[in-house]
């Protein structure tokens, strides 16, 4: 006979109040483990400890069911079918605009091909510290804490990584000590390959924002990105058109070398919301390169898009 009290004591010694334990007459142990608030690695470690603790003489079988209250923190993916369309620029400025709209936001730069967020947010070269192997996000002058693949590895190195290493690194970024952040904006690598699929499946964003430029080709790529999320069951918040029209810095006149309304029409055809257009301006490029995100200033461009996203998040 297994002593129920002994098993309970042993499990409580490692898991405290988080575990509730039952032992039946055949020595089968059932444990319900409440992992609310624990990072994935801590949860796995606790489960392993509980199993070891429960394995007393006479125990024939151990079942552990891990539960967690739905974490309040959600991920919002910013994605594009190809590189160079302004996905990182949008992710940074949306994170800031969402924070200015009152949300508690963090930014995760998962772009292994070109992690540009440290530069965009003016914290290039600053490494995150860690406590008990858990990373502390890097504070930025824009007020949005950041963790980036670029802070973990030297530029270009992550390209040689294999899938599981990339997945492991991303988990470290997402499961970091984000404190009170309720939303993590996730700057995904461009494209629709295995890396993106793994990231999406593992971290299940609450929704995805797709960025495209007005060119036809980019929109075809955007369609692929949309399909990727739809297949994975991740809702599309909407499509943002970047580099839409060129605003002349001298006279302010906007010209549209690639025509107008392409992305909006594509969004309609794809039955996804159109969230807005961001013009191609020298001001956006210069501010971004200097580590001064334009959404921090007198922002007429990113705020309306962020407002729609905030409304979507409140509904979903
Ligand atoms: P991606 O993340 O899709 O590769 P980036 O955000 O790095 O693209 O943008 C690529 C380049 O285009 C950067 O130099 C950026 O400053 C510039 N850029 C992005 N959006 C705009 C815009 N609306 N107006 C001017 N330059 C832009």
Image (tube, rainbow, N blue to C red):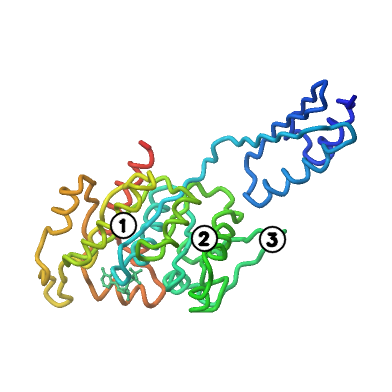
Q: Position of residue 30 (x, y in %)?
A: 73, 29
Left or right: residue 31 compared with residue 3:
left
Which residue is identified by label 1?
Answer: 225
Which residue is identified by label 3?
Answer: 133
Residue at 37%, 57% (x, y): give it. 78
Between disc 3 and disc 2, whose residue precedes? Answer: 3
Between disc 1 and disc 2, whose residue precedes? Answer: 2
Q: Position of residue 12 (x, y in %)?
A: 82, 35
Q: Position of residue 233 (x, y in %)?
A: 38, 43
Q: Position of residue 140 (x, y in %)?
A: 50, 65
Residue at 33%, 51% (x, y): give it. 306
Quarter of image, ligand 1:
bottom left
Which residue is identified by label 2?
Answer: 145
- CA distance for labels 1 and 2: 27 Å
Whether pointer 3 and pointer 1 mark residues with C-beta atoms closer than 8 Å, the reply is: no
Q: Which residue reaches farthest top? A: 25
- Is 134 located above or below residue 312 in the figure? below
Residue at 54%, 37% (x, y): give it. 70
- CA distance for labels 3 and 2: 18 Å
Q: Quadrant of residue 271?
A: top left
Callout in the foreground (3, 1) = 1
Depth check: give the residue in front, 17 or 304. 17
Residue 170 in view: yes
Q: Secondary structure at mark 1?
A: helix
Callout in the foreground (1, 2) = 1
């Amino acid at each position: 006979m297994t002593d129920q009290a002994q098993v309970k004591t042993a499990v409580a010694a490692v898991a405290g109040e988080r575990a509730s334990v039952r032992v039946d007459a055949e020595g089968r142990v059932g444990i319900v483990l409440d992992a609310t608030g624990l990072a994935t690695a801590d949860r796995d470690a606790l489960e392993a400890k509980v199993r070891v603790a429960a394995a007393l003489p006479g125990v024939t079988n151990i079942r552990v069911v891990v539960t967690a209250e739905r974490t309040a923190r959600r991920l919002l993916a910013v994605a594009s079918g190809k590189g160079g369309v302004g996905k990182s620029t949008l992710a940074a400025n949306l994170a800031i605009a969402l924070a200015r709209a009152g949300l508690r936001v963090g930014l995760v730069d998962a772009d292994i091909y070109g992690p540009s967020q440290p530069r965009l947010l003016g914290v290039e070269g600053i490494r995150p510290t860690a406590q008990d192997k858990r990373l502390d996000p890097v504070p930025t002058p824009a007020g949005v804490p950041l963790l980036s693949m670029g802070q973990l590895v030297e530029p270009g190195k992550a390209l040689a990584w294999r899938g599981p290493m990339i997945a492991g690194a991303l988990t470290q970024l997402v499961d970091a000590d984000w404190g009170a952040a309720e939303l993590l904006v996730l700057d995904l690598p461009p494209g629709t390959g295995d890396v993106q699929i793994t990231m999406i499946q593992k971290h299940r964003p609450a929704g995805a924002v797709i960025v495209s430029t007005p060119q036809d080709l980019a929109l075809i790529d955007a369609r692929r990105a949309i399909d990727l999320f739809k297949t994975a069951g991740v809702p599309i918040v909407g499509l943002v058109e970047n580099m839409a029209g060129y605003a002349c810095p001298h006279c302010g006149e906007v010209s549209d070398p690639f025509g107008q309304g392409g992305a909006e029409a594509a969004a309609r055809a794809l039955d996804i919301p159109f969230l807005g257009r961001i013009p191609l301006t020298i001001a956006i490029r210069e501010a971004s390169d200097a580590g001064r995100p334009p959404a921090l200033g007198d922002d007429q461009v990113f705020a309306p898009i962020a407002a729609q996203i905030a409304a979507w998040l409140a509904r979903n």
